[in-house]
Amino acid sequence: MLLIKFGGSSVGSVENLQRVVQIVKKQTEPFIMVVSAFSGVTNTLQSLGENALKNTHQPILEALKERHFTMAKSLLPIHRQTNALVHIGKTTLALENLCNSISTLGELSERTQARIMAQGELLSSFIIGEYLNQEGVNVSYLPSEDYIVAQGDPLNAVVDFSQTQLRMQQIDTEASYIAPGYIAANPAGELVVLGRGGSDYTASIYAYCLGAKQVELWSDVNGMQNANPKLVKNTKVISQMSYEEAFEMAYFGAKVIYPPAIRPAMEKKIPVLLLNTLAPEEKGTRIHVATQGHTDKVLGVSTLSDISMITISGIGLAGTKGSARRVFQALEQADVNVILITQSCSEQSICFGIKTSDAQSAKEALEREFAQEIGSLINPIERTDNHVILALIGDNMNHQTGLSGKVFSALGANGVNIQAIAQGASERNISVVIDAHDEHKAVNVVHERLFQEVIKRVHLFIIGAGNVGGQFIDIVYKQQEYFRQQYKVDLRVVMVANSRQYVFADEGLSQEALSLLSTSGATTYVSAEALAELIIATNRRNSIVVDNTASAQVAAIYPQLIRKSISVVTCNKIAGSAPLEQYTALMELVKNQNCDFQYETSVGAALPIIKTLQNLRLSGDTIHRIDAVVSGSLNFIFNHYNATTPFVEIVKQAQKEGYTEPDPRIDLSGLDVIRKILILSREAGYRKEMSEVVFESFLPEKSLETPSVEAFYKVLEENEAFFQDLYHRAQQKGAKLNVVAQLLEGDIKVSLQEIPASSPFYQLDGKDNIVAFYTDMYPTEPLVIKGAGAGAKVTASGVLSDVMYVANKQK
């Protein structure tokens, strides 16, 4: 014999019931078909009793009656409708009488509520039974309340298996039946129910008592998923699992099976199949005895919500026999179920997780029990709410070294604070308590970290959509599919902001949507700090803020973001050249928050200058001297100036081609080079301030004091002879002019130098940069890095390289 159960969604519409008939017709051996109430009916019945107390039940009752009439008329031809319609009428009349009594007495007992809530399955099973027989599936009606005996709480009754098994001996196992799920009767013959989800339990009870070959639980999902599909988009079906694994997953929130339904099947080693009514060809999930069928270290990740944490602590607990007994005895007397427990080795604190609905009762029970000690030997009882328990589940987690470390590292990198940890001796379940606010992010982070075939989603918040920002955005969209295929990284641009407005989409912006940025379709923000708060509030996992600006205001929000474990990638030089105290605090914050701050492109665009310097120091090398041409704009200007074309025209050309800032005074003031050599000196291990950089100006006196760009150009034009003189003096020596930044044993200087033909700097062309490191390992022949060091596209590619470095770092 088989046990086949169809849930509320499977029997909730005419179309689905037609699918059910086709599934049942394929059965080749006797079966008992257990059905739930039509979808939503149990909730309606629950509210019916509550509304009867307010005498507002009549509209609900009429809607309930009409729904069942409509279903019967849709399923059955007119000449077969009478029995069903009469049954519906009698049932709803009995419900009306019950509701009127509740309204008159002003009382709704649990016994009466159970009687009301049982009617959904009694109605659906009768109607579906009539429909099956009409369609040629011969089934007899099996009243579950006559066979399943349960007692205790009428809304969550405990089954008496010995009495139930005795009664079920009367059932002919060679015939097929339809039976209502969820319901039973107590020894007095009164209707009780088996808890929400109890139809699964009903099927398992029948299977246990009748020695069924198999239990099939049909719903609207393809078996057990390895995470909640409402939280994680790319879940996968668990093809097979042990009873123990299934119980853990169900207990910690997987709705596809009711946890108590597992135990009866497990005791008799009856396989349980979780199947999909909407896709009956899918294999679903098979639950049976533990086997070597799967090798996953972690089978799934699940969460249990609405958790409160209660902590009792104090020196009065340490070494005092019976303290734990008193705690849990008090909770038992208050009818509080403990879900998770942790205790410190010093015995000075006990922390446990319970349902939030029990939290006040638990706190009051402990305050009564320890009334004499609280305030002296024991601290006031602490209660915190809004938590969830995140559980990793799998038989194969046993003795897997480093598994917990992976999980804690992934959560920490995303700013998820773990407030309590529990692990059973079997190592089948590792549970952590986190803030409810972090549930979505935490589940996705753990799912990505542990299931290797899953593509890691990275959320990009891009600030700056100008030259570099625009190029960066273009490259990201162009390379998205490549990164998915080759690196299993899904770069999602979720926000793009300019200096005033932003556009945002939780699942990612299309490139076309970015055109809204300069229109009324974008959202205005008031400050960089406000923008940072908006980014933080999204609480996305694997978040990276990409700063493509030169804004001091944007650089100032880095600490705000990093404190929330949001990584930052930037080509902005301001943070790296900030006052030393501010810079040091930022770097310390990055280290403590376990996130990334990447700024390779702040010096030399995409050239690997900073990473090379960092690697030299990691190897134990000492940096003694750095010579660097790191201004693409100044290199362009002095490479193109030949004393024939006026100097001012070369500067204008550099501005037009995007090598300088819109205000070229910024470039020619040397500030850009000063910032870059200061960044390199700090990376080399020297704690330097900007004021310690010696700058030798190469412009005519007072040229930088001009009030506008036009006035600046006029001064350059008037001083053409000054620049010609510089050029000719260098030419006479066979040298070229260039602005060189130099670090020498801690002293820093930026100056215009005459580069001799013997220097590696002599052959520097166009916008190229060059950096030479003199170290213990490279004392006379320096380590030289040379290449394109300016331009929006090459800088953007370097920024993207840093983004991918962060994205891949913790995969």
Image (cartoon, grey):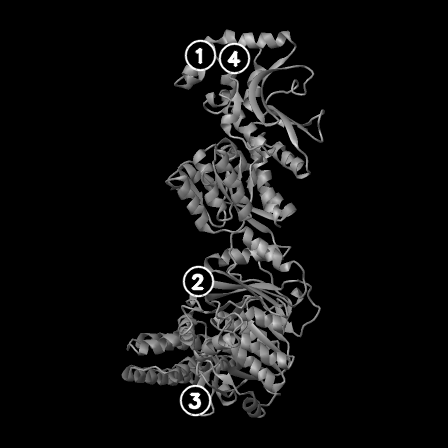
What kind of element bears circle 1? helix
Distance from disc 4 to disc 1, alpha carbons, whole Å, reads: 11 Å
Q: Which residue is mark 2?
A: 386
Distance from disc 3 to disc 2, alpha carbons, whole Å, reads: 38 Å
Residue 550 lies, in percent from the top left, at 48, 32
Distance from disc 3 to disc 1, alpha carbons, whole Å, reads: 102 Å
Distance from disc 2 to disc 4, alpha carbons, whole Å, reads: 67 Å
Distance from disc 1 to disc 2, alpha carbons, whole Å, reads: 66 Å
Mark 4 touches mark 3? (CB < 8 Å) = no
For this view, does 120 lie left or right of residue 677? left
Which amino acid type corresponds to the residue marked 2 in the rendered image?
Asn
Give the vertical position of 358 relative to 464 (above or below). below
In which quadrant will I find the N terminus?
bottom right
Query: Sequence order check: which comes first, mark 1 or mark 2?
Result: 2
What kind of element bears circle 3? loop
Q: Which residue is mark 3?
A: 190
- Disc nearest the viewer among 3 and 2: 2
Along the line of sight, which residue is nearer the eye, 72 or 569?
A: 569
The mark found on residue 715 in the picture is 1
